[in-house]
């Protein structure tokens, strides 16, 4: 009786293990490929509970979520033979489980490397037909679509779908970038020197014009002043001549008074002269001061 009970328990355990080994669940993010003796038996793409032959059938799990692949610092040569560094992002997903298992044994590392190789080739070919400015213009979208379509064709046998390829950055290599910055700096410095030289030249021209205008204005003012002074002297001489003709004695008296005024300016002026000198003619009383005409 005991042996029968033990045998029943063993049978039940084996049946439970066999039942557990024959059931598998596919989730929304997975694909399941059932293989039998190394050959693909069935493919389960839809979520649900499925059965397989225990211990004979094997389940290969394949992630059907979107895979993001980064390609950084890829060296490309444009049509003018200059080289640039490109960063790109590739998005792909498995769309054929049979092909994916057959081509790369459902190994995403192998698939990633093969896709990366095709992206590199597509980048070089696409950039090789264009200039650097194309990657910075509206043509950039067309370049990304061209790269995506080319990679799709080259990877269709892998059982994957290339959803999109995006170019993140197109830049010069570091050594070329430094040379470019240095050249730009030298060009800007030369341009600044040229602008400064033009400014100095204009400043000198303005200063020379101002000096010339000042000299001309001063000369004209001095000329006009000399003319006015000459006219005044002439008028003064004319008036003196008229006065002299009308009353020579009064004119002589006036001249003597002006001479006294000029000679006796200042409190510390001392003259030593003879009393009967002509200079003191109108002080001696010998000549009376004439009346004004």
Image: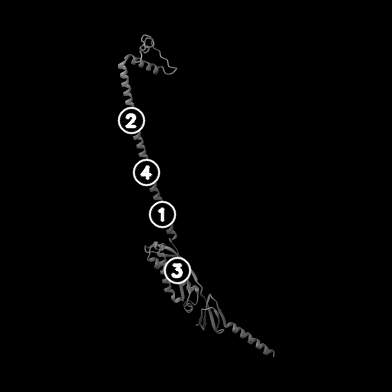
How many C-alpha atoms fall within 10 Å of the one at disc 2: few (<14), some, or many (≥20)? few
The CA distance from mark 2 to mark 4 is 32 Å
Q: Quadrant of the N terminus?
A: bottom right
Residue 283 drawn above or below residue 134? above
| Of the pair 128 and 147, the residue shown nearer to us | 147
The CA distance from mark 1 to mark 3 is 33 Å
Residue at (32% x, 23% y) in the render? 235
Residue 272 drawn above or below residue 120? above
Q: Which mark is residue 165?
A: 3
Q: How is the image coloured?
A: one colour
How many C-alpha atoms fall within 10 Å of the one at disc 4: few (<14), some, or many (≥20)? few
The CA distance from mark 1 to mark 4 is 27 Å
Q: Which mark is residue 202?
A: 4
Q: Is residue 56 left or right of residue 137?
A: right
Which element type, helix, strand or loop, lies under badge 1? helix
- 3 vs 2, front mark: 2
Marks 3/4 in contact by CB < 8 Å: the verdict is no
Which element type, helix, strand or loop, lies under badge 2? helix
Residue occupied by mark 2: 224
**Furthest residue in direction left, as rendered:** 245
The tag earlier along the polypeptide, 1 or 4, is 1
The tag earlier along the polypeptide, 2 or 1, is 1
Marks 1/3 in contact by CB < 8 Å: the verdict is no
Q: Is residue 128 left or right of residue 101?
A: left
């Amino acid at each position: 009786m005991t042996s029968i009970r033990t045998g029943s328990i063993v049978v039940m355990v084996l049946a439970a293990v066999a039942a557990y080994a024959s059931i598998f669940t596919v989730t929304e993010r997975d694909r399941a490929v059932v293989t039998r003796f190394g050959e693909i038996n069935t493919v389960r793409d839809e979520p649900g509970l499925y059965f397989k032959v225990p211990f004979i059938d094997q389940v290969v799990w394949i992630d059907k979520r979107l895979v993001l692949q980064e390609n950084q610092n890829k060296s490309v040569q444009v049509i003018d033979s200059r080289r640039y560094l490109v960063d790109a992002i590739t998005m792909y997903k498995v769309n054929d489980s049979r092909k994916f298992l057959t081509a790369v044994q459902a190994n995403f590392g192998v698939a990633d490397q093969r896709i990366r190789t095709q992206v590199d080739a597509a980048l070089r070919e696409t950039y090789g037909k264009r200039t650097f400015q194309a990657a910075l213009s509206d043509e950039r979208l067309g370049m990304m679509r061209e790269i995506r379509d080319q990679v799709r064709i080259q990877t269709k046998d892998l059982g994957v779908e290339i959803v999109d390829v995006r170019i993140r950055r197109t830049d010069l290599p570091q050594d070329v970038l430094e040379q470019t910055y240095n050249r730009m700096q030298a060009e800007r410095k030369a341009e600044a020197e040229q602008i400064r030289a033009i400014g100095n030249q204009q400043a000198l021209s303005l200063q020379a014009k101002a000096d010339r205008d000042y000299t001309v204005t001063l000369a004209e003012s001095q000329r006009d002043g000399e003319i006015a002074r000459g006219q005044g002297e002439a008028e003064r001489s004319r008036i003196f001549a008229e006065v002299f003709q009308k009353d020579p004695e009064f004119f002589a008296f006036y001249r003597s008074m002006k001479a006294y005024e000029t000679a006796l300016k200042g409190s510390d002026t001392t003259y030593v002269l003879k009393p009967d000198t002509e200079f003191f003619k109108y002080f001696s009383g010998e000549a009376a001061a004439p009346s004004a005409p």
